[in-house]
Image (cartoon, rainbow, N blue to C red):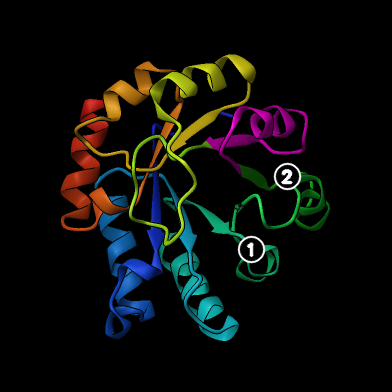
C-alpha cells in the first residue's frame, strides 16, 4: 500500500471533557481534511463504547467520501462504524488476530518501539508499521523510550513495508524524519491549534 505523507491522528484525550462531543471532533477532523489530510486515525480511549461508536460513526458519515478512516485499537468499533482500517498497539490484538477479525481487505497497521518488534511486524499480517516515539512526546501518559532518527534509519532497513514515524513529530522536524526513511509522519499535537493551516503547511513541507 501507499500511505499519504501526513498520517493525522484525532486523539480524543487532547480535547477537554466539554469538547468531547461528536460535533467538535467531527469539525476538527473536517478541518484537517480541508487542509489536505486524506488519512485520519480516530483514537479514543476516553469514553464508553457507546459514546466512542457514536463519534466514530459520525466521522464516517461526514468524511467517508474524502478520507480514509482508521480506528485505533478497537476491532469491534472498526467493523461497527464501517472504517477502512484498524491500528493496533503492542498491548492489543496481534496483527494476525486483528486481520482475522477485520478481514483481508481492510487496512491494518501496528505500533512498534524497537527493532525486534519491527521485524515481528514485518512478518505479520500488518500492511504498515508505525515506529516510535522518534522524539519526546506528551501524547501518552507513559510513553515508550525515545528511539531517535538513527534507529528510524535502522527500522527502515529492517522492513520493506510502509513505515510511519510517530512521537514528537512536528512541522519543525518532519522533513528530517522523512529523510531518515519514513514514508509517512503521524502527528497529533502539532495539528491541534490550527488544523487546516497546519495540515496544509506540513504537506507543503513534505512534497
Q: Secondary structure at mark 1?
A: helix
- The answer to whether residue 41 is above or below residue 203 is below
What is the C-alpha distance between the residues marked 1 and 2? 13 Å
Upstream in sequence: badge 1 or badge 2? 1
Q: Is residue 112 left or right of residue 193?
A: right
Image quadrant where residue 80 sits = bottom right
- The answer to whether residue 146 is above or below residue 78 is above
Q: Between 132 and 67, which is closer to the camera in this rendering?
A: 132
For the point 52% across and 73% down, the residue is: 57
Q: Please give the residue where the numbered disc 2 appears in the rendered image.
A: 105
Residue 90: horizontal and vertical position, in percent? 65, 49
Residue 85: horizontal and vertical position, in percent? 61, 51
Residue 104: horizontal and vertical position, in percent? 78, 44
For the point 40% across and 34% down, the residue is: 134
Q: Is residue 202 visible?
A: yes
- The answer to whether residue 22 is above or below residue 110 is below
Q: Please give the residue where the numbered disc 1 appears in the rendered image.
A: 78
Amino acid at each position: 500500500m501507499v500511505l499519504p505523507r501526513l498520517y493525522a491522528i484525532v486523539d480524543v484525550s487532547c480535547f477537554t471533557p466539554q469538547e468531547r462531543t461528536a460535533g467538535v471532533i467531527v469539525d476538527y477532523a473536517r478541518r484537517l481534511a480541508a487542509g489536505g489530510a486524506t488519512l485520519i486515525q480516530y483514537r479514543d480511549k476516553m469514553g464508553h463504547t457507546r459514546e466512542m461508536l457514536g463519534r466514530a460513526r459520525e466521522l464516517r458519515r461526514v468524511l467517508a467520501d474524502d478520507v480514509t478512516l482508521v480506528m485505533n485499537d478497537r476491532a469491534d468499533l472498526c467493523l461497527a462504524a464501517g472504517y477502512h482500517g484498524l491500528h493496533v498497539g503492542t498491548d492489543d490484538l496481534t496483527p494476525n488476530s486483528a486481520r482475522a477479525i477485520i478481514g483481508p481487505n481492510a487496512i491494518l497497521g501496528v505500533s512498534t518501539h524497537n527493532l525486534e518488534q519491527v521485524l515481528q511486524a514485518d512478518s505479520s499480517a500488518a500492511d504498515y508499521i508505525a515506529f516510535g516515539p522518534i522524539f519526546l512526546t506528551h501524547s501518552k501518559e507513559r510513553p515508550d523510550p525515545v528511539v531517535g532518527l538513527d534507529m528510524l534509519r535502522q527500522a527502515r532497513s529492517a522492513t520493506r513495508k510502509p513505515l510511519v514515524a510517530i512521537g514528537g513529530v512536528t512541522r519543525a522536524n518532519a522533513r528530517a524524519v522523512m529523510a531518515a526513511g519514513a514514508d509517512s509522519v503521524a502527528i497529533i499535537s502539532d495539528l491541534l491549534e490550527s488544523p487546516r493551516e497546519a495540515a496544509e503547511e506540513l504537506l507543503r513541507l513534505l512534497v
